[in-house]
Image (tube, helix red, strand yellow):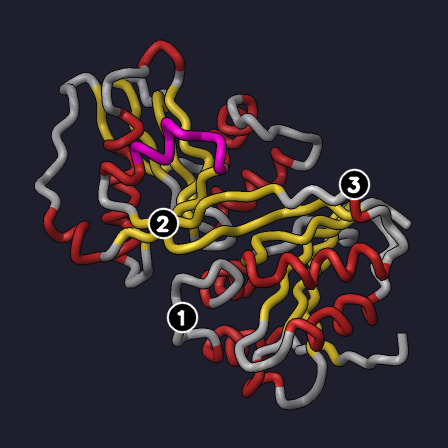
């Protein structure tokens, strides 16, 4: 591609993050960039790079973030630029291996389809994996009364020691997921309901996008309201950080969607993921 790109130095990533401060419900905005500013790579093979179209990136906000570790997770967004700018930027990077385009909004689906075709791929094989994006106003959290637990249980925070347990129970477990979950536990807040022996019975993590994720209750402890309780606990923690409370739920998970909506979460959009095969 004739289009050029420049890399944003790591010590200027905070400036890019600040550019997105006006919209704190954007999945590829403030919280994603904040996550990667804090994130620590664990091997020489792992890399994180942010690319943009030109030196005016503080104004237009065009960026593509590539987190490479065997395969690549790719995030992109713009504030005042056009989808065409982002498509050219993506194509200019000439990513050859398997990569996943992560958390893009509905308004970028056409961009993704054009990028797919630019790669010479069959559009009939592209499948946008979709989720509903939910937002819980902090005013709703402030109305909540104090939650009470069974005396045999307590709230607590998860650490990377629980990464294997979380991974084992994740519906989307894959060869990369343990490292992904470990990174989330080490970089973002996460919490659960624990028994008297300190074993987690239910948990909820916070994704790189700043959304509540990986909500799970062990089978023997379901129908006790633990999912709602741990979400409420996490929501209070997120508000305490001065952040917006967001969540993503796959379209088909009606039970989870109903639970979030009962708690006061409001659907504000859609977010998608797609795996691009190696060329």
Disc 2 crowd rating (10 Å Cα; few below 14, some 14-19, many 20+) is some
- Which corner quadrant of the image does residue 219 belong to? top left
Front residue of 220/190: it is 220
Among the two numbered marks 1 and 2 on one chain, the one whose residue lies closer to the N terminus:
1
Provide the major secondary structure of the magenta segment. helix
* Looking at the image, residue 20 lies above or below residue 183: below
Label 3's element? helix
Magenta span includes 271 = no
Name the residue tied to disc 2: 267
Name the residue tied to disc 1: 23
- Which corner quadrant of the image does residue 108 belong to? bottom right
- Which corner quadrant of the image does residue 106 belong to? bottom right
Name the residue tied to disc 3: 125
Where is residue 10 drawn, in percent x and y? 63, 73
Where is residue 60 drawn, in percent x and y? 57, 83
Among the two numbered marks 2 and 3 on one chain, the one whose residue lies closer to the N terminus:
3
């Amino acid at each position: 591609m004739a289009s050029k790109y420049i890399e944003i130095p790591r010590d200027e990533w905070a400036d890019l993050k600040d550019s997105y401060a006006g919209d704190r419900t954007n999945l590829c905005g403030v919280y994603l960039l904040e996550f990667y500013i804090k994130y620590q790579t664990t091997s020489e093979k792992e890399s994180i790079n942010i690319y943009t179209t030109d030196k005016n990136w503080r104004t237009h906000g065009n960026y593509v973030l590539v987190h490479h570790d065997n395969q690549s997770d790719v995030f992109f967004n713009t504030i005042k630029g056009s989808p065409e700018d982002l498509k050219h930027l993506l194509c200019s990077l000439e990513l050859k291996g398997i990569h996943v385009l992560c958390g893009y909004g509905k308004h970028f689906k056409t961009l993704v389809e054009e990028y797919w075709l630019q790669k010479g791929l069959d559009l009939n094989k592209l499948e946008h994996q979709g989720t509903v994006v939910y937002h819980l106003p902090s005013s709703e959290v402030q109305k909540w009364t104090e939650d009470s637990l069974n005396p045999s249980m307590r709230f607590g925070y998860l650490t990377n020691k629980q990464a294997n347990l979380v991974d084992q129970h994740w519906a989307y477990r894959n060869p990369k997921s343990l490292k992904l979950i470990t990174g989330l536990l080490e970089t973002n807040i996460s919490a659960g309901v624990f028994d008297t022996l300190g074993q987690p019975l239910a948990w909820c993590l916070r994704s790189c996008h700043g959304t509540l994720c990986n909500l799970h209750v062990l089978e023997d402890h379901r129908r006790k309201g633990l999912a709602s309780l741990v979400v409420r606990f996490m929501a209070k923690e997120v508000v305490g950080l001065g952040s917006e409370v967001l969540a993503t739920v796959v379209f088909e998970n009606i039970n989870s969607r109903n639970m979030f909506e009962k708690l006061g979460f409001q659907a504000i959009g859609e977010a998608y993921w797609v795996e691009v095969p190696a060329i």
